[in-house]
Amino acid sequence: MERIIRRRRQLEAAGQQSFFAPAPPEPPVPQTFPDPEPAPLPFRPTPGPRRAGPPLRIGILGSGSGGNAVVVESGDRRILIDAGFSCRELARRMALLDVDPKSIAAVVLTHEHQDHCRGVDGFAKKYKVPVLATAGTREGAGLREDRFRSTVLIRSGEPREVAGFVIEPFTIPHDAAEPVGFVVEDPCGRRLGLVADVGCRTSLAWGRLRDLDVLVLETNHDLDMLRNGPYPWSLKQRVAGRHGHLSNREAAEGLPELMGERLSWVVLYHLSRTNNLPALAAAAIGEALDREGCPARLAVTEQHHPTPWLEIQEV
């Protein structure tokens, strides 16, 4: 305990706030940190109305520190966001949702950490699909074009069409080489936004996550559970830092800015098994939805089992 107190005093003397200091009063307006990019692109125009067509379906194969992967489907078009399980496990989980791995047209990566790209090499090679990743993610993951069909470089703010979907990457703060979140728009104009690992809210990310039908948002930890949990002090600082992971409270504070008339689903993603509980995350986000009168439904993802399909029906 004396060592912790000494460390706290050292931090305060250096002008840093100790993680173990009492949490400051919550401000009346959610705080937005400066953008990680020096000159973010202007926001895109408000999307047009949705068009009639087959439902947009989202299948989360699993989410957490043990692996993350999401199938996005519109009609007979399918892509996979992240491949954080082995190739065999990805195929097994897809089968539980009646998805043929051969129907996946591309794999899109958020960043190079193993719980997001563990199986991408084997999956892309076996099923001969392209992998879309930033240059930093490609290098960090050690992706080699000679082992499978191709690697397609993507950049923040540059939309790209893949299998009929328009995918727009945007920079997010996380301790990876070049991490991104995504907005994915299907051929009928339905929109999914996903931020898997994000240390804090930024105006760039929150500006992109507007006018969505489905929001997949990290709710990694409960701050009290993290403070009092078994992680070493240095890891607690990393998780709670601006390039770590988003807490239940931070996600709930930022959610009102992302609520719109078309929002149908809010999906709680990347929950820590050590520092969070599904009930705590659902309570925090559910209260935020109720306060704003937002009718969007809530889904909590699991690590060991796929989440049942989430659907946006045809208009």
Image (cartoon, rainbow, N blue to C red):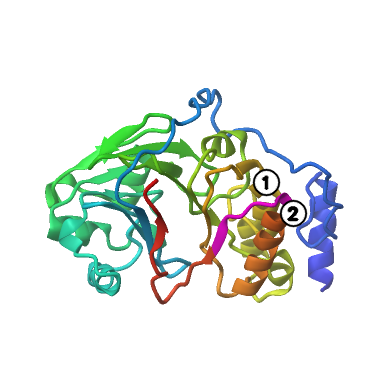
- Nearest the viewer among 175 and 124 is 124
Q: Write down the region rendered in magenta.
A: 292-298
Q: Dot 2: few (<14), some (14–19), or many (≥20) neighbours within 10 Å?
A: few
Foreground of the two, 135 or 187 = 187
In the rendered view of the protein, which quadrant contains the C terminus? top left
Q: Position of residue 189 (x, y in %)?
A: 38, 38
Viewer-proximal residue, 123 or 286? 286
Amino acid on which the number 2 mark rests in the picture = Arg
Nearer to us: label 2 or label 1: 2
Looking at the picture, how far across and down is residue 242, in whole percent?
Answer: 63, 47
Residue 312: % across, % down: 41, 53
- Cα gap from disc 2 to disc 1, whole angstroms: 9 Å
* 295 is within the stretch colored magenta: yes
Whether residue 292 is visible? yes
The quadrant holding residue 280 is bottom right
Please give the name of the residue rendered at 85% of the width and 53% of the height, measured from the top-left corner: 24
Instruction: Indicate which disc residue 291 carries.
Output: 2
Image-based side of 193 in relation to 146, left or right: right
In the rendered image, residue 243 lying in the magenta stretch gets the answer: no
Residue 277 in sight from this viewpoint = no
Determine whether the residue tagged by mark 1 lies in a helix, strand or loop: helix
Q: What residue type is labelled 1?
A: Pro
Residue at point 25%, 69% (across, down): 98
Q: What residue do we see at 30% from left, 39% from top? A: 187
Q: Would you place residue 113 above or below residue 259 in this image?
A: below
In this rendering, is residue 310 above or below 280? above
**Which mark identifies residue 256?**
1
Residue 120 horizontal/vertical position (percent)? 26, 57
Q: In which quarter of the image is the N terminus?
A: bottom right
User: SS at mark 2?
Assistant: helix
